[in-house]
């Protein structure tokens, strides 16, 4: 009887150990999967961060170029002025790669990511409002609205088609360099260019709005490159370099 009891106890113990072992294997596999998925998402976020910095730097360059021309500080042809003024209205909104983080936090399984530094940078990246704020300010800027109001639609369409954003594949760091600021020709007639340029040059409200847009862009770029440098940009760059 005692022998049978021992056999039963040992059998139960072995069964429990086997079950625990299998559960641990399953948890470890799940942890590895989530960790790798989160790293991949953050690598794309790192690219998106650099894309935003580069893109809005190019928007800023065009805004300054247009403002300098309107203030008589730097000569600019009518066509070049129209292109710069149009590009100063542009913004780029990247798709966030937060599915893994949202799944982990909604299920309470963020602890499966056992690297505390990785958890921390994920939290900072996906809870920061800076990316949304930059885009919203660009979308709702007084300058963008006013330029789009006063310039004929066909002129805007032509500039967008010939001088608008270049397609930038996710992860392609080389492509972000000239995503917006590159040599181009609008294809518009001389008359259409002269007419629209005259509207731009003759509208003091547009210049005032452009000055405000430049100031806002400089604030946004300072936030992205200075204020969030240690908390966001540098850690994301480190994650990106792991696979580059």
Image (cartoon, rainbow, N blue to C red):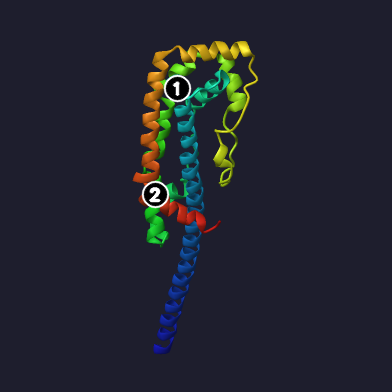
Residue found at the very far left of the displayed protein: 227
Residue 107 appears in the rendering: no
Above or below 77: residue 171? below
Q: CA distance from mark 2 to mark 1?
A: 29 Å
Q: Is residue 58 left or right of residue 226?
A: right
Cβ atoms under marks 2 and 1 closer than 8 Å: no
Res. 208 in view: yes
Q: Nearer the viewer, residue 165 or 131?
A: 165
Q: Could you say which disc has been placed on residue 144 in the image?
A: 1
Residue 225 figure quarter:
top left
Label 1: few (<14), some (14–19) or many (≥20) C-alpha neighbours in 10 Å: many
**The residue tagged with tag 2: helix, strand or loop?**
helix
Name the residue nearer the viewer: 225 or 171: 225
The x, y position of residue 99, in whole percent, is: 47, 46
Q: Is residue 220 above or below residue 244?
A: above
What residue is rendered at 36% in x and 41% in y?
223
Image position of 29 (left or right of 108): right
Q: Secondary structure at mark 1?
A: helix
Residue drawn at x 46%, y 56% is 238
Mark 2 or 1 closer to N-term? Answer: 1
User: Which dot marks residue 22?
Assistant: none
Q: Residue at x 44, y 52 (%)?
A: 236
Q: Position of residue 62 (x, y in %)?
A: 49, 29
Mark drawn on residue 232: 2
Instruction: Between residue 184 and residue 47, name the one nearer to us.
Output: 184
The x and y percentages for residue 188 are 63, 17
Q: 69 or 33: nearer the eye?
A: 69
């Amino acid at each position: 009887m005692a022998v049978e009891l021992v056999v039963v106890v040992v059998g139960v113990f072995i069964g429990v150990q086997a079950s625990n072992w299998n559960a641990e294997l399953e948890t470890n596999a799940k942890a590895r999967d989530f960790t790798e998925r989160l790293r991949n998402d953050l690598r794309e976020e790192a690219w998106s961060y650099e894309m935003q910095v580069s893109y809005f730097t190019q928007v800023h360059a065009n805004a300054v170029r247009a403002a300098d021309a309107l203030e008589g500080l730097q000569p600019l042809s009518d066509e070049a002025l129209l292109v710069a003024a149009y590009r100063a209205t542009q913004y780029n909104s990247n798709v966030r790669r937060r599915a893994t983080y949202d799944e982990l936090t909604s299920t309470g399984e963020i602890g499966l990511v056992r690297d505390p530094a990785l958890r921390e940078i994920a939290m900072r990246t996906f809870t920061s409002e800076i990316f949304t704020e930059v885009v919203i300010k660009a979308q709702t800027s007084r300058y963008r609205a006013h330029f789009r109001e006063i310039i004929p639609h066909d002129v805007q369409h032509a500039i967008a088609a010939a001088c608008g954003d270049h397609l930038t594949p996710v992860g392609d760091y080389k492509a972000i360099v000239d995503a917006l600021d590159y040599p181009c020709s609008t294809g518009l007639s001389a008359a259409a260019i002269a007419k629209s340029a005259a509207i731009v040059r003759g509208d003091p409200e547009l210049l005032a709005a452009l000055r405000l847009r430049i100031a806002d862009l400089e604030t946004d770029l300072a936030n992205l490159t200075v204020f969030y440098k240690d908390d966001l940009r540098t850690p994301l760059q480190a994650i990106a370099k792991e696979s580059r």
